Amino acid sequence: MLGSRKKFDIIIEGGTLLTMVDGEEPLHDVRVIISGDKIQEVSARQDSPLPETNEIINSEDSIILPGLINTHGHSPMTIFRGIADDLPLNSWLYEHIFPAEAKHLNPDTVYWASLLACLEMIASGTTTFVDGYFFADEIIRATDKAGIRALVAQGVLDFPAPGVPDPKKNLDVAFEFLERWINFSDLITPGIFCHSPLTCSAGTLLKAHEISNRFDLPLQIHLSETQEEVKEIKKRAGLRPVFYLDDLGLLNSRLIAAHAIYLNEEEIDILAKRHVKVAHCPESNMKLGLSIPPVVKMLKKGITMGLGTDGCASNNNLDLFGEMDTAAKLAKISDLDPTLLDSRTVLKMATVGGAKVIGLENRLGTIEAGKKADIIIVDTNTPHMTPIYNPYSQLVYSATGGDVRDVIINGRVVYRDRQFTTLDRNDIMARVRRLSRRIGG
Amino acid sequence: MLGSRKKFDIIIEGGTLLTMVDGEEPLHDVRVIISGDKIQEVSARQDSPLPETNEIINSEDSIILPGLINTHGHSPMTIFRGIADDLPLNSWLYEHIFPAEAKHLNPDTVYWASLLACLEMIASGTTTFVDGYFFADEIIRATDKAGIRALVAQGVLDFPAPGVPDPKKNLDVAFEFLERWINFSDLITPGIFCHSPLTCSAGTLLKAHEISNRFDLPLQIHLSETQEEVKEIKKRAGLRPVFYLDDLGLLNSRLIAAHAIYLNEEEIDILAKRHVKVAHCPESNMKLGLSIPPVVKMLKKGITMGLGTDGCASNNNLDLFGEMDTAAKLAKISDLDPTLLDSRTVLKMATVGGAKVIGLENRLGTIEAGKKADIIIVDTNTPHMTPIYNPYSQLVYSATGGDVRDVIINGRVVYRDRQFTTLDRNDIMARVRRLSRRIGG
């Protein structure tokens, strides 16, 4: 078969390209050439004849853009999608989610629910996701099977947790997890996810930080997500959560803080100064009735921000297109200013912003020669995407994840004409349905 | 062909049915029988053998529910989708939208852009919409061709308007419009849409009210949408907008107030007392950076509310599923209470609530014998709709309009397996694209 090997692997022909490179305007009638796992060349289609290639993807009547990056989630929670909604925060968490996790999570549910999440993310244009949960080995196995890029972290907290009945061993489990997966695949990065400053002691946080540093890996944490957290940390440590973590020495450019809602000016300043990355989860924050984080202020202070869906128990889907739309609209109504978080800024958060959050901006987040070929193609030949005056605006305010037609990750077509090439969609859905019957409503 | 006529016209077989009748729980494995334009019977599938019928729609792995009702919009504005986003309110309206309308609206653009809106609404599960715009005859022609149900109103304001260059004739035009269409079709109700208390004088409002009363038809108005409106009306009349309209005698059960954002307690009370109907447009309000209306308070006071998308220049789509999701989440974050506007309440707003807003609750809004057959079927055999614990929650928090697979309006299948039966999708999109090229960005 070597003889049939063409010069290039995939050529995307036609359509409007948003490279998401700073200062670059939309390009029309383009050609994107992919060779191996990388983008080889971006050009105008008419500039040269079509080179020999193994695969041509016709992308007329489409928008081509970098794959979206979901900077915060718990993918196996697809199994709990809609299990407990519209409830008071503490009832939701302590009476429904935690008990359901304790009772129903095992390697099997985590594996299949993660595969379901991969189906959903791929089908809505996410090519990289950041995850933190339990039985994280199974998330990696699912992720690897799907061919999606991910930062998968083992959850750590100081209570008995699914798969980690003895909290004294939580960091041993995490350490072994990192050792096991650190050199496994170019697409998958392991990590540690400290549940929150509330549920992890100072000792646990310090050790998780130390291990992450040793491996040179990002550390994730839910930070300033609830008022209760702020109150409790102030009571325990005499400091607001951000200053508490700073005191512990945890704030650095490898820390990914999810939510980051209840922040005062000084906390925003210190997050910026320490180059902490923030994952903004607007739909989850809204649905849980939390509060609106100071996103525009954080961006103005230079904080690197991405968008996250959070888990399916508080959203209830993994569609980053919806998240972009909500992020833009929420910022506007929060500050009563329709000019805030314009569509291009929001799309940057979901692409280059996300790449920076995970420290992979040299490889991901834009479409330019030399970058990894993580590319999505959005169908615009539909009523709700017609007409088009501004492609950024169309993607953020008119599209949904369902408009994604093709997805390429690391130079491999994982979704073509809305068909999955790496996963058996019907089998995965059937397995999760069967598992869900034991869980009930 | 009379000989081939079966006893029933359409039978929907299988799936989960949400009748949206108060107190009724979801029914599983159902059969819905449609005869002519009406629902004949709702039953469990196993109760009897399948009767003879002209058409069977298999709806296993689906949720069947009443067609959604969009209580506020300007359908021809699809032609301006994304033309001017992320701008200050006055620049958006006075420098972009009004000039674009003045320059580009004519019967042809309104007709084709309305057809595009009908495509989009049908494909996202809307079976009835409330509209107010100019060249409204063309909206009715499009609506009639699509086979969708609508309350279509001729826009009235005291400035030269598209199709009504002489504002002195605005109410003559509206009166003739009502006369022309009042007996045209069972699906289409004509009406008058007064643009706002700011742009219509007291005399114009009174006359529009008087004409609407004479025809026994709903009157629409944008009410308390902007702070400028509140300030100006207070300056002109010494009263806040709701009291100003009450003073004029405009507040009654036939008035549909769109937006209703800036309201104090007394205004909410008077709207409730006068049985004014309110169209809540959460996405438009957010995108324009207006403010969050007191939705929960209004519902508590017994005000009948529906959901509306508003026009595509401020949303930018006509997807009521998105609107339900946003309405629920916005209420929760507005009052920092995740129990507010639960999924069932929101789905009621989009169905029975909408039917009450237009005074057609005896015919529309629920699935029960004797009601008009306005029914949609949502595909749940997809990753993001798996698993299902709570169908209300699934529709509001996980679905998008793109999950709608079949749409029946007035007993006629207008969308089957995602194919339009009444409209030529590609032709309409091509026409609108051609028209949009003259408009530019």
Image (cartoon, coloured by chain):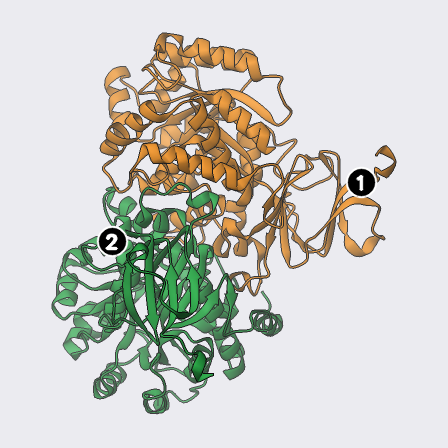
Chain colours: A orange, B green
Judge the density around disc 1: few (<14), some (14-19), many (≥20) Cα neighbours within 10 Å. some
Tell me if A252 is positioned left or right of B365 in this view.
right
Identify the element where label 1 is drawn: strand
Is residue A311 among the parts visible in the rendering? no
Residue behind mark 1: A8
Q: Residues within 10 Å of mark 2 (few under 14, many from 20)?
A: some
> Is B305 located above or below residue B237 in the figure?
above
Amino acid type of the residue tagged 2 in the rendering:
Thr
For this orientation, the residue located farthest to the right is A3
**Residue at the disc numbered 2:** B345
Q: Quadrant of residue A105?
A: top left
Q: Is residue A341 above or below residue A117?
A: below
In space, the residues marked 2 and 1 are separated at their CA atoms by 54 Å
Label 1: chain letter: A
For residue B148, side relative to residue B220 (left or right)? right
**Residue in the foreground of this view, choosing between B20 and B252:** B20
Residue A177 in the image: state x and y as whole percent. Answer: 51, 15
Number of numbered discs present? 2
Foreground of the two, B210 or B409: B409
Residue located at (40% from left, 47% from top):
B398
When the figure is inspected, residue A282 is found, relative to residue B160, above or below; the finding is: above
Question: Residue B433 in the image: x percent, y percent?
Answer: 60, 70
Residue A150: which numbered mark, if any?
A: none
For numbered disc 2, what is the local secondary structure?
helix
The percent coordinates of residue A164 (x first, y second) are 38, 14
Q: Nearer the viewer, residue A73 or A122?
A: A122
Mark 1 residue type: Phe
